[in-house]
Amino acid sequence: MAVSGIFGWLNIRRIGIIIELPDEIYDGTDTMASVRLVNRKSVMASFLIRVKVLGAEVGFTMVKGGGKETGSVITKVLGRGFRPLGEIRVESGFPINFFVRNKKYEISERFVVFPKPSSCAVSAGFDGKGMRDETVARLKGSDGDVLRIRDYTGTEPLKLVHWRISARHEQLKVKELAAGASQPVILDIDQLPGANLEGALCCGAYLVNIFVRRNRPVGLKAGPLLIRPDLSRTHRIRLLTELAVYGKS
């Protein structure tokens, strides 16, 4: 028993834990987290290690001295907003499973949980067509505003021919239109549909993702805060973060 206790104690000594979370975590949705176990003992290996984090568990058969191993867990985090990683527990029954040794790590590092996207629709009142002061990407299309007038190449449909201007020139002229889907839109949290605030925020998360996926610049109005429309992934994460923390003290 004494030898077993000593080896068990040495087995979990100088073990480091690195948790890597994805940058998109949604409330109540399965999320895969990466768990890296680092054995800081230069020679002695560690055996039969279990790591418990965020209500899930992953096991490691052996980590060589000075080595590292990576596993993954599927977890589900409930509640939007910033959340701490909290307690991480390292356990092992090595060498004979007579005693289970454990070590606790309290991690104060936080991560953000976004509202769970919920399918919804918004009225035309949310459309940003009147916001001409916005600087947004304009793409070629067939149903938006006129970007410019150019020469007819023979491939454009006749409905795009600008007959009045063509009459003044020796060559046909056509209208080059902006794609309607590229019109900017700003979502106002106070006007989003939903039975309550949580429902509205879930709707907002759905719309942010769907608009960006459709190449439509999207912005957000959250109380006095106004975020201008954009399409970048960093921008989308920022909007989802604002939805996640909205109304939280």
Image (cartoon, helix red, strand yellow):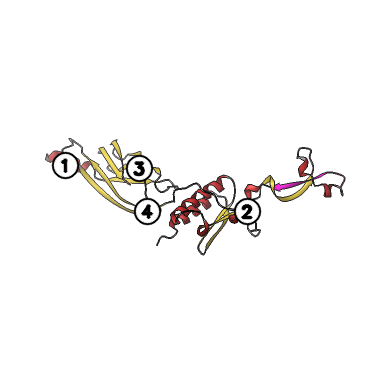
Q: Mark 4, mark 1: which one is toward the viewer?
A: 4
Q: CA distance from mark 2 to mark 4?
A: 34 Å
Q: Secondary structure at mark 2?
A: loop
Which residue occupies 63% across, 51% down?
A: 183
Instruction: First in sequence, mark 2 or 1: give its number.
Output: 1
Q: Secondary structure at mark 4?
A: strand
Q: Secondary structure at mark 3?
A: strand
Report if residue 29 is visible in the image.
yes
Instruction: First in sequence, mark 2 or 3: give its number.
Output: 3
Q: Secondary structure at mark 1?
A: helix
Instruction: First in sequence, mark 4 or 3: give its number.
Output: 3
Image quarter of the N terminus: top left
Query: Which residue corresponds to mark 4?
Result: 83
Amino acid type indicated by mark 1: Ile
Above or below for 243 versus 19? below
- Residue 160 at what x, y percent from top left? 76, 44
Instruction: First in sequence, mark 1 or 3: give its number.
Output: 1
Amino acid type indicated by mark 4: Arg
Query: Which residue corresponds to mark 3?
Result: 35
As drawn, the residue found furthest toward the left would be 1
Q: CA distance from mark 4 to mark 3?
A: 18 Å
Circle 2 packing at 10 Å, graded few (<14), some (14-19), many (20+), is: some
Q: Mark 2, mark 1: which one is toward the viewer?
A: 2
Amino acid type indicated by mark 2: Val
Which residue occupies 46% across, 54% down?
A: 195
Query: Which residue corresponds to mark 2?
Result: 136
Q: Are marks 2 and 1 in contact (CB under 8 Å)?
A: no
Start-end of magenta stretch: 168-177
Q: Any mark on residue 6, and which?
A: 1
Assess whether residue 173 is covered by the magenta stretch: yes
Q: CA distance from mark 2 to mark 3?
A: 40 Å
